[in-house]
Amino acid sequence: MAFLISLPSVVYGQVTFDPVRPRDTNRMEGRRTETVYAGTPYWVASYSASRLTTAEAALFDAFNMDANDGGYIAGYDVHRPRPIAHQGSTPLSGVKAGGGAFNGDAVLQSITDANTIVVSGLPAGFKLAPGDYVEVRKSTFVRSLHRISQAATASAAGVVTLKIRFGLNTQVFTLPCTVHFEKPACIMEMDAGSFSLVKTWPNYTGQFTTTELFFS
């Protein structure tokens, strides 16, 4: 049975977290080039942490066991766990424009098109910048992670219109959905054979790579 696991809670020195857009480019005679985009874009990531303590290395060992026993990973960019305007070591907090505590969770109010969504349930004046991450979640294992392509600020009512890439799959992600700005994640699987934990006294180095999985 599928179960969700979290990334080991350590300081990561080197991380890559990027989308892949499948394409095939054909270069022909006469300086002609044709490019065909096919399939759904997906995320890939690599995580590396060095100077781990023995206790932190144990977290990596436990994580590896779970990942190899069918655990799926809530993968996110650990160097950008929240919007850049709110970056820091503390999780998102505050008060929603309509009242109630804000912890980074919001509501997908409407879908204008695949690249434009309207989000509500934010604090008034909540700022978002190009490159910030936003997660649209249908259920625990059905998530879609995007980067914001244009700066935006929530209205006095806590509503904001966001331009995103790549496009949201509007056949899978229909209302109602939630939206997340604190550790926005997608569902990933650790790549086979990518895990490494070099145990050199007194510190250790752990690393692994992951690739997004799709559920619907």
Image (spheres, grey):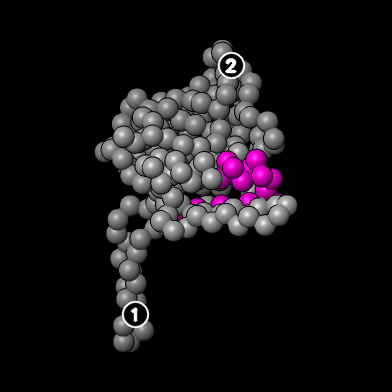
Label 1: which secondary element: strand
Q: Which mark is residue 134?
A: none
Q: Nearer the viewer, mark 1 or mark 2?
A: 2
The amino acid sitting under disc 2 is Ala
Q: Position of residue 121 (x, y in %)?
A: 50, 21
Residue at (33% x, 27% y) in the render: 175
Q: Is residue 57 magenta?
A: yes
In the image as oriented, which residue stretches furthest toward the bottom? 30
- Is 3 above or below relative to 123? below
Q: Tell me the number on the disc at residue 27.
A: 1
Identify the residue at horizontal 44%, vertical 58% (top origin): 193
Image quadrant assignment for residue 181: top right
- Secondary element at image label 2: loop
**Local crowd size for mark 2, using a 10 Å CA cut-off: few (<14), some (14–19), many (≥20):** some
Q: Position of residue 47 (x, y in %)?
A: 56, 52
**Residue closer to the observer: 12 or 178:** 12
Q: Which residues are magenta?
A: 44-60
What is the three-letter code of the residue carrying label 1?
Answer: Arg
The answer to whether one can see residue 30 in this image is: yes
Q: Quadrant of residue 168?
A: top left
Upstream in the sequence, badge 1 or badge 2?
A: 1
Q: Which residue is mark 2?
A: 101
Observer able to see residue 15: no
Residue at 56% across, 13% down: 100
Mark pair 1, 2: CA separation: 55 Å
In this view, 48 is above or below 142: below
Q: Is 99 within the magenta? A: no
Q: Position of residue 216 (x, y in %)?
A: 28, 38
Quarter in which the N terminus is drawn: top left
Q: Is residue 134 left or right of residue 201?
A: left
Nearer to us in this view, 58 or 174: 58
